[in-house]
Image (spheres, rainbow, N blue to C red):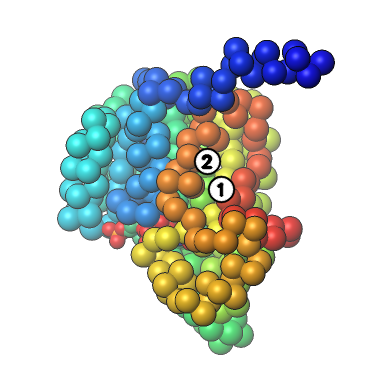
Amino acid sequence: MWRRVVRCLQTNPVGQMRMSQSTFAGKVAVVTASTDGIGLAAAQALGQRGAHVVVSSRKQANVDKAVALLQNQNIRVTGTTCNVGKEEDREKLVQLTLDQCGGIDILVSNAAVNPFFGNTMDSTEEIWNKILSVNVTAAFLMAKLVVPHMEKRGGGNIVFVSSIGGYQPMQGLGPYCVSKSALLGLTKVLAPELAPSNIRVNGVAPGVIRTRFSSALWENEDFMDEFSKQLSIKRAGETEEIGSVISFLCSEEASYITGETIVASGGFSSRL
Ligand code: NAP
């Protein structure tokens, strides 16, 4: 029996099972909030595997920089500004993608804000409205906009970027963590509804990843010392380690996975 397993591993080395430059050939991927951090890493991972990626964020200068960086890596890329909280921006992003790329196969909904740190009981209606409208409502509305175009292509993939905080709330980040739990629910709700259209809906829940967004956490040695005690892999994560999970979820290698959120947190507890 073991001899058969070893032979199988010899003929199918792990390297051969890895995704190739043509995994997403002919596919168009829209990644929101993708001029930095996890969104940019997702665009890179999808683009390196052959997708035409559409990157966007609020600031034109950031879009220009991200487009140049991806072009330098021979990735097919289109860029535009899009604040996901604005309906006209979301529509512009989708229309531009259709005009310039001819369709949409993949949506990575990555944008989020967190304008509040403190006791949840001190948060205001304004804060809740802001967090929920950008982190949850806009994520759903982006999905709603792209689904008819995925259906025209015979299917597609949606990935919501949630957070480990959606499973295990972090102190001081109450409303943000609630918004990230909502994305776990949105993933579960949309997966069966969109399965008949051959659209898979999944999520990724990163732990602490070294980006600007979370710099207050990973740059704080005291926090990291304490936090690391709860990690199996005792370091903050890198953006590429989330980009690769997103790319896996969008690939045919994940063809039997829908409605799931993969936790990539270095082993931080993740039970809701
Ligand atoms: P980041 O490195 O700070 O990048 C944020 C990106 O979002 C930038 O490109 C920014 O560009 C853009 N952006 C901000 N607000 C936007 C808006 N309203 N509409 C469109 N684009 C917007 O952040 P990140 O850490 O990669 O975070 C990305 C996602 O990962 C978020 O959903 C976050 O909740 C999640 N996450 C992060 C961590 C972590 O430890 N870093 C952990 C768990 C989950 P502009 O300024 O030009 O708009």
Residues packed near mark 2 inside 10 Å, few (<14), some (14 to 19) or many (20 plus): many
Task: Give the amino acid type for the residue marked by disc 1 in the picture.
Answer: Val
**In the foreground, 191 or 149:** 191
The image position of residue 138, as x and y in percent, is 46, 54
The 10 Å Cα crowd at callout 1, few under 14, some 14 to 19, many 20 or more, is many
* Residue that label 1 marks: 204
Q: Earlier in the sequence, mark 2 or mark 1?
A: 1
Image quadrant assignment for residue 266: bottom right
Q: In this view, does 178 lie above or below 84?
A: below
- Dot 2: element: helix
> Height in image: 35 above or below 258?
below
What residue is shown at x 61% (from left), y 16% (from top)?
10
Q: Are marks 2 and 1 in contact (CB under 8 Å)?
A: yes
Q: Which residue carries the number 2 mark? A: 245
Of residues 81 and 68, the one drawn nearer to the viewer in this rendering: 68
Provide residue 261's location: percent of width, then percent of height.
Answer: 63, 46
- Residue 16, above or below 271: above
